[in-house]
Image: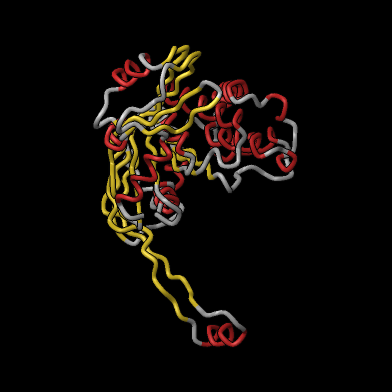
Amino acid sequence: MIEVQSLCKSFKVSKRKAGIGAAIGSFFNPQYRTVEALKNISFTIGEGEIVGYIGPNGAGKSTTIKVMSGILVPDSGRCNIQEITPWKNRINHVKNIGVVFGQRSQLWWDLPVLDSFNLLKDIYKVPEKEYQNNLDLLTATLDLSDIMTTPVRQLSLGQRMRCEIAASLLHSPKILFLDEPTIGLDAISKIAVRNFIKTINKEKKVTVILTTHDMNDIDTLAERIILIGKGQILLDGALTELKRKFATHKTITVDYSELYSDINIEGIRILSQENQRLSLSVPLDRFNVSEVIGQLSQQMEIMDVSVENRPIEEIIVDLYKEHQL
């Protein structure tokens, strides 16, 4: 469905020192430096996949999305999306894709949400029956019924982002590009957006490419991640494999009613112990979790136990460090 081969994109960026003199000098004798945003990146994405496209700021994520959506033309390389080259046949291409940029809007600021949706229906030439079916589905699943007559400028950020996602799906696209879709959202809005993305992926086989700095989005939605750094693809694989590689320890939290002796298991680090609750960090290369719990049961009267995997944020930080990002 999506095939990217050896994409390269660079930008010319002006440079000058601070001060009025430097500003006048740069006006008559401008100087530039070249920034290579993409360096020979290649990957393929199949129908119905949800792919987390991650990397630090300035890695090239948004540039890739803009090339794949036809906004930017690369310096070299090839991009084939459903047998279409995005920047060569933009009209046909945009019929098949939906794009949400977390910090940009495709809605009309002073118009009610419904008017923006009706305008998009005419722009994409969506048949009336298909439009109504999609509108009813999106309104119900994203909880938009109470804000459809509200001007966009009066919406909260969470409400607007839900409307942006709905707007990108009114024309039944097969591919959805999401660039920071949950930026600035509250917990309830984030959960609603994540659940909706999973629903359309499962029921309509919509392919989703997700770029975000919120690793909970990746953990909840993506089965595969592509890591980009300094314009290059550094890793492409299953999220489960990544977790297995970097999941060096687990956290055991125990609630107890009575303590028989001081807790001292060599190689186990105590994270906290107060109010009859104990948290331990267990290195998986040396200990089996069940064995540790068995040892704890001999030293205390256990009331409850929970075992947590290493947070995805820590795993991603280690991944960045490994690639020196």
The residue located at (39%, 25%) in the rendering is 263
* Residue 260 can be seen, yes or no: yes
Q: For this rendering, which residue is in front, 85 or 6?
A: 6
Tell me residue 258's x, y (percent): 48, 14
Identify the colour scheme used: secondary structure
Residue 70 sits above or below residue 280 on the image: below
User: Which percent across, then down, holds residue 212?
Assistant: 47, 42
Residue furthest to the left in view is 285
- 211 or 64: nearer the eye? 211
Q: Nearer the viewer, residue 265 or 316?
A: 265
Q: Is residue 89 above or below residue 181?
A: below
Q: Residue drawn 34% across and 56% down?
A: 231
**Corner quadrant of residue 261:** top left
Position of residue 20 relative to residue 316, above or below, is below
Q: Nearer the viewer, residue 266 or 246?
A: 266
Expressed as whole percent of the image width and height from the top left, the position of residue 200 reads: 47, 25
Residue ID at (34%, 62%): 75
What number of labels is visible? 0
Q: Residue furthest front?
A: 261
Judge left or right: residue 267 versus residue 139: left
Q: Quadrant of the N terminus?
A: top left
Q: Quadrant of residue 264?
A: top left
Please state the horizontal and vertical placement of residue 62, each as a whole percent of the image. Answer: 45, 51
- Please identify the quadrant where the C terminus is shown: bottom left
Residue 129 seen? no
